[in-house]
Image (cartoon, rainbow, N blue to C red):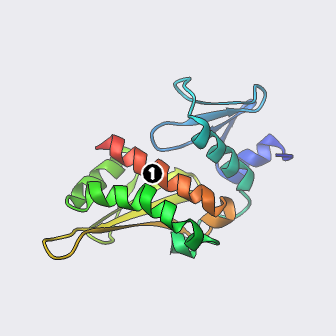
Amino acid sequence: MGRDIGEVSRLSLCLLEGTRIRVRMPGGDCLVDFERRAIERESGESPGPFLGVLILHYLAGCSGLVPTGRLITFREAPGGDVYYPAFRSRTIETIRARFSSDPALLRAAGERIGGTAVKMGSAGVQIPVFPKVPVTVVVWEGDDEVPGSVNLLFDETAPRILPTEDLVVVGSVVCSMLKKAV
């Protein structure tokens, strides 16, 4: 990474604990141990390769930027149109299938993993995937004539912290956490 561990901790809004950085995440904190060159969940389990790489990309990508609150769609991220089919199939369609017939369930699941209800669509929840990368999930309930729909919205600063292809993985992580929280 080439930066001082204290600077990485400060810029990422994560806690420095000796030679480790504690990354607060829904579903449990992860510890990045720079001395051992290891990443593990607080429970001692591995977060898995996808989440581990995502955490490292987050820590490396943080700068003085702070979320602005202005939300963008995935397609508005650089190259978002290229990655959209994967994003749609891995996240949007899965969340739509699970929550569009019961929007209140989305809000409840989101709150169980540390999200905050937002007034958008039929139900919405903002989930702090990383301290500087909140994701807002919005569901619109369908009916007999119109199918339900879902969108995931990112703070406009997210693509300057994580590459667009990592936002696909962020969406998958959110999807997985919501499904487990039901």
In the image, is residue 158 above or below residue 71? above
Q: Quadrant of residue 160?
A: bottom right
Q: Is residue 126 visible?
A: no
Write down the residue under mark 1.
174
- Between residue 44 and residue 111, name the one nearer to us: 44
Q: Is residue 100 left or right of residue 32?
A: left
Foreground residue, 54 or 8? 54
Residue plotted at (53% across, 53% down): 170
Q: Position of residue 172 (x, y in %)?
A: 47, 51
List the single residue furthest toward the left: 144
- In the displayed structure, does residue 33 sit left or right of residue 44? right
Q: Is residue 60 or residue 74 the one in the foreground?
A: 74
Pinpoint residue 10: horizontal percent, then vertical percent.
72, 49
* Residue 123 relative to residue 132: left or right: left
The crowding category of the residue bearing disc 1, from other C-alpha atoms within 10 Å (few below 14, some 14 to 19, many at least 20), is many
Give me the residue at 56% from left, 73% from top.
81
Q: Residue 57: x and y, percent?
A: 69, 50
Q: Is residue 10 visible?
A: yes
Q: Residue furthest right?
A: 2
Query: Horizontal and vertical percent for residue 158?
Result: 61, 64
Callout 1 secondary element: helix
Q: Is residue 108 above or below residue 32?
A: below
* Image vertical order of residue 180 relative to residue 13, above or below: above
The quadrant in which the C terminus is found is top left
Specify the amino acid type for callout 1: Val
Decide if residue 46 is on the left or right side of residue 92: right
Residue at x 24%, y 53% (from the top left corner):
105
Q: Which residue is at a point 49% across and 65% down the rendered structure image?
A: 85
